[in-house]
Amino acid sequence: MARILVIDDDTVVRELTAEILGHNGHTVTQAADGNAGLAAIRSQPPELVITDMEMPGMDGVEMIKILKRELPELPIIAMSGATQSAQYLYLASYLGAERLLNKPFAIGDLLATVNAVLQPPNQG
């Protein structure tokens, strides 16, 4: 399974997301904000990043910009539960996030989204 980094300043969302993914065979690292997430990525790049869009310090917009510049092949799932989540997620998609999740999300939606991103493209 994959090495996944979950970045979210909401402890409950971050820990539950990590627990769900861990129970499904993934190795999950957590970061409470964008700066800690970027440090973790630079220390040991994961195979997938799941990032919240609205966080103190470095937000998801800045995180996606940096990652797409430094590690363009690293897949990103952006998530948001903010009042303006539609705008945040549209911007995340524009910047290169592969998939989007509205919070709160169902466990099945999280797992399906992660599996879709990690599944290799069809060879044909």
Image (cartoon, rainbow, N blue to C red):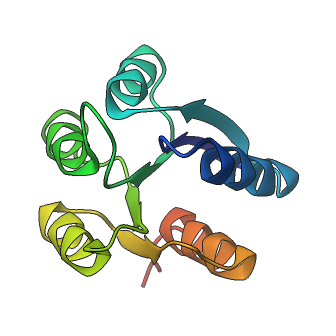
- Residue 90, by quadrant, is bottom left
- Single out the residue that lies furthest toward the top: 43
Residue at image coords 82%, 58%: 24
From the viewer's perspective, is residue 23 above or below residue 35? Answer: below
Residue at image coords 67%, 39%: 28
Left or right: 43 as drawn, with respect to 25: left
- Residue 29, by quadrant, is top right
- Single out the residue that lies furthest toward the bottom: 124
Coordinates of residue 55 in the picture (x, y in percent): 34, 43
Left or right: 43 as drawn, with respect to 69: right
From the viewer's perspective, is residue 25 above or below residue 122? Answer: above
Left or right: 62 as drawn, with respect to 80: left
The residue nearer to you, when weighing 116 against 50, is 50
Q: Please state, as top left, top right, bottom left or bottom right, where the C terminus lies in the image.
A: bottom left
Coordinates of residue 107 in the picture (x, y in percent): 73, 74
Residue at image coords 31%, 52%: 54
Residue at image coords 18%, 76%: 87
Coordinates of residue 45 in the picture (x, y in percent): 45, 28
Coordinates of residue 15 in the picture (x, y in percent): 70, 44
